[in-house]
Amino acid sequence: MPTRTPPIATRLNHVAYPTADTAETVRFYTEVMGFTLAHAIRGEIDPETREARPHLHTFLSMASGEVIAFFDIRGLTPSAQDSMPRWVRHLALSVDSRETLAAWQAHLQRHGIHVTGPIDHEGTWLSIYFADPNGITLELTHQSRALTDADAAHAARMVADWTGRSDTPRGV
């Protein structure tokens, strides 16, 4: 009897990143970004190796309930960026309008934060980019329209062209 695929995940719970400065990270996300410090967990053991490794895992919540989490591991400093351009690895957060996006850009700049953009992504997303205190690239974006089946078909053609394969799956 074939195994059934479990239901797809329903929403993002959290993403986790390293930090070497919990106080500055919490300050940035609460005072600048308006998140709420929602929870923290202190651990003493590395869950993979079972060795002593004191760490603090903090959870900062958006209004939607979705969370950005950080690990501060005693004695470890997050390693430098790899060779990928900074814009490749980023966390994109939605805003409700172009006006809100512009207000965020001004707000961030008043806090002395360098902002790139706005950048128009083919008329579907308008985005600004900036870094948090950990060097994590954040994107605030306004999506101007819902994605359609035509977008998915176009994406499948682009992937097939890029990879040289015509068997690229489209959504479920």
Image (cartoon, helix red, strand yellow):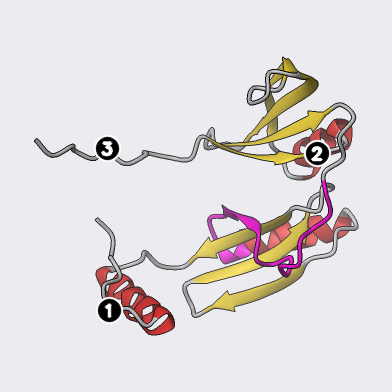
Predominant secondary structure in magenta? Answer: loop
Query: What span is colored magenta in the figure?
Result: 79-100
Say whether residue 145 is left or right of residue 95: left
Three-letter code, disc 2:
Thr
Comparing 84 with 50, the one in front is 50
Three-letter code, disc 3:
Pro
Whole-percent x, y for residue 96 in the image: 53, 55
Tally of numbered tags: 3
Whole-percent x, y for residue 77 in the image: 87, 40
Sequence-wise, which precedes: disc 1 or disc 3?
3
Specify the farthest residue to the left.
1
Which image quarter is the C terminus in?
bottom left
Q: Quadrant of residue 163?
A: bottom left
Say whether residue 87 is left or right of residue 10: right
Image disc number at residue 107: none
Separation of residues labelled 3 and 2 (CA atoms): 33 Å
Q: Residue drawn at (77%, 23%), measured in percent from left and top?
A: 56
Which marked residue is nearer to the observer: mark 1 or mark 3?
Answer: 1
Three-letter code, disc 1:
Ser
Whole-percent x, y for residue 136 in the image: 75, 52
Image disc number at residue 19: 2
Q: Which residue is mark 3?
A: 7
Relative to 164, say whether 81 is above or below.
Answer: above
Q: Residues within 10 Å of mark 2 (few under 14, many from 20)?
A: many
Separation of residues labelled 1 and 3 (CA atoms): 27 Å
Q: Which residue is mark 1?
A: 166
